[in-house]
Amino acid sequence: MTNPNLPGEAATILAPGEPPPFEVHNEAGGAPVLLLCDHAARFVPGALNNLGLSEAELSRHVAWDIGIAEVTRDLARHLDAPAVLSHFSRLVIDPNRALDDPTLIPQLSDGVIVPGNRDLPEAARRVRFSTFHKAYHEIIARKLDSMAARGPAPAVISMHSFTPVMKGLERPWQVCVLWNRDARLPVPLMAALRSQGLTVGDNEPYSGRDNHGYTLHVHAEPRGLANVLIEVRQDLIDTHHGAAEWAERLHRALGSTLSDPSVHEARRGI
């Protein structure tokens, strides 16, 4: 995307009655914690004709992070924290990718060709950006502004899920913690999860030090906010029971960590 801030940016592809591009859950939550869920939904606006994909393809992990939206909402309730969740498929545009990332609007994802994303005109890319990507990140920024003004500095937790098998390789972890330079949340969180007898990945199966941490790089790091990206394996949370169980597990693991006053200090330059 060469220049998303061109005239006509306010154009939208959402039809009347279609859902907004984000959901703010438990907005009145009083805890100094903001949960984010970049890949919460598989919604594709009608104007895009399912991107040329079948319902079965849009139900797969390529379109969304299976199970994690329910975990995020349950965890928000346990923590009394607000949460911002996307409401569009990552195949429409991926809010956890920079604008110059070639996977921002993927033409191929885990072997699935996405016809509706091939040879996409620049004008169509701009409309997807302004309708979804920009709107999602603007609400995150506004929420962080209001929480920071109220004080103390909020911790930011980005919620994702990962497939148990990728490219024929089984992934042994039950939960993974992705992080960059700020160790305040991830290191004690990994210790707490391991104390529950879990197999925990440290910057696995992806790394929080590259484009997989885009949302945190944009919002948490420049503000000096403690942050972490949590990935839960999808086969553990693809039912209501599993999602509820993992929300409770994460709540237990996060409890003592989030009560540390140092987690709620803005530390720029980490």
Image: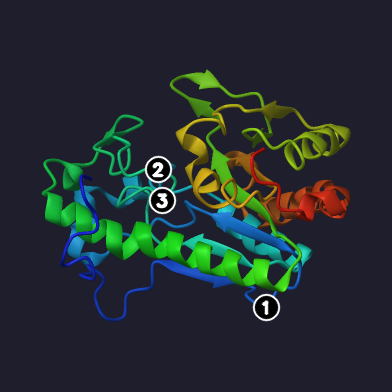
Of residues 22 and 47, the one drawn nearer to the viewer in this rendering: 22
Q: Residue furthest front?
A: 269
Within 10 angstroms of label 3, few (less than 14), some, or many (20 or more) residues? many
For the rendered model, the colour scheme is rainbow
Residue under pointer 2:
97
Left or right placement of residue 144 versus residue 4 in this view: right
Is 69 situated above or below 94?
below
* Labelled disc at residue 245: none
Element at label 1: loop
Looking at the rendered image, the quarter that the C terminus falls into is top right
Q: Position of residue 76 (x, y in %)?
A: 69, 64
Query: Do residues under tags 2 and 1 come within 8 Å of each other at their CB atoms?
Result: no
Residue placed under numbered mark 1 in the picture: 28
Q: Position of residue 242 (x, y in %)?
A: 68, 50
* Residue type (three-letter) at the residue carrying disc 2: Arg
Residue 187, how many percent across, how many down?
A: 78, 34
Sequence-wise, which precedes: disc 3 or disc 1? 1
Q: Which residue lies furthest to the top in this view?
A: 169
| Real-space Cα separation, disc 3 to disc 2, in angstroms | 5 Å
Distance Cα–Cα, label 3 vs label 1: 24 Å
Q: Judge whether 16 appears above or below 91 on screen.
A: below
Neighbourhood count class around disc 2 (C-alpha, 10 Å): few under 14, some 14–19, many 20 upward? many
Residue marked by disc 3: 95
